[in-house]
Amino acid sequence: MNGDFNYDQAFARNIGWVTEAEQAALRGKRVAIAGAGGVGGVHLMTLVRLGVGAFHIADFDRFDLPNFNRQVGAMQSTRGLPKIEVMARMARDVNPELDIKLFPDGINDGNLEAFFEGVDIYIDSLDFFAFEIRQKTFALCARRGIPATTVAPLGMGAALLNFLPGKMTFEEYFGWGDLPEADKAIRFVVGLAPAGLHRPYLVVPSAVNFAERRGPSTIMACQLCAGIAATEALKILLGRGTVQAAPHGLQFDAYRNKLARTWRPGGHKHPIQRLAIMLGKRAFAKMAKAP
């Protein structure tokens, strides 16, 4: 049925919020998404329906039952199948003209340069605990002048940070360096959402376990992330609208009906951020000792 597809008709309802010329521009853009699970899968499908025409997607994992609560590609019919193949099929089912380059081994030292070749924007969708490769992806984006957006699913909300060419880098903001993974995890969660809107309603604290690399999640958070990430991508790709870069951040929490805008000059070096990191270490040390 590919012959029946018409790009202009398929995305005609976008016109009004974008012009016909802007829609045509989106058709020619290439977006890199590392991770095709919780946020990555929804990011991909949202941008496909926005009319973006080309993607690089990377993931080495397969769908299974623990993914069912939040990952749009996780279904009984896809259990055991590679996430990247399922998501590429879903994307092409919307737009059969898509140019999708797959990286079925995920991103690593061997393919990182190729993953970012010709890319207009990178949207971070890696697992929270993928510290080493996340550090490398953002460093390469900074070197190549590629805009990079990360929107973290936290509780029942989302926290946004943009890292734009010429602005504060990921490393300058988080200060990971060669720190142990436990320290990186604390700096990451504190830096992603300095306002911490999600923290008061974590009803089972033991569900967060950095040592076992696990934490709770919701589909609402993933979908909110995709809406925010795609909107930021639209503004960056079309060069219109206000786009704030780190150390500016934003967190919206649907459960608490709250929106917070944050500003941490110096990133991890900011006095409030240093205090939050210290308190975070104490809190997670306490949680680690709890039965």
Image: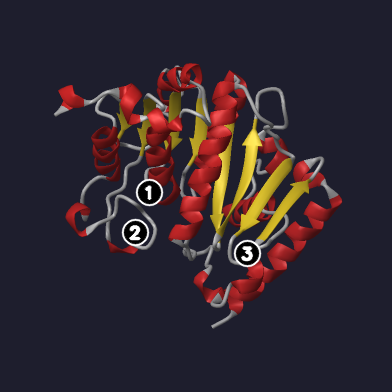
Report the front residue among 165 and 158.
158
- The crowding category of the residue bearing disc 1, from other C-alpha atoms within 10 Å (few below 14, some 14 to 19, many at least 20), is many
Q: Residue 14 placed where, x, y %?
A: 45, 32
Q: For residue 144, which quarter of the picture?
A: top right
- What residue occupies the far bottom of the structure in this picture? 291
Identified by mark 3, the residue type is: His
Residue 90 place in picture, x, y as percent? 26, 40
Residue at 59%, 61% in the rendered image: 254
Residue that mark 2 sits on: 67
In terms of secondary structure, where does tag 1 sit? Answer: loop
Residue nearest the viewer, comparing 170 with 125: 125
**Distance of mark 1 from mark 2, alpha carbons?**
8 Å
Between residue 2 and residue 33, name the one nearer to us: 2
Residue 65 visible in image: yes
**Cβ–Cβ below 8 Å for labels 1 and 2?**
yes
The Cα atoms of the two marked residues, 2 and 3, are separated by 21 Å
Q: Are marks 2 and 3 in contact (CB under 8 Å)?
A: no
Residue that mark 1 sits on: 37
Q: Which mark is residue 198?
A: 3
The secondary element bearing badge 2 is classed as helix
Q: Quick one: SS at disc 3?
A: loop
* x then y, percent, for residue 112: 44, 27
Question: 16 left or right of 250?
Answer: left
Residue 80 is situated, as x and y percent measured from the top left of the image, at 21, 53
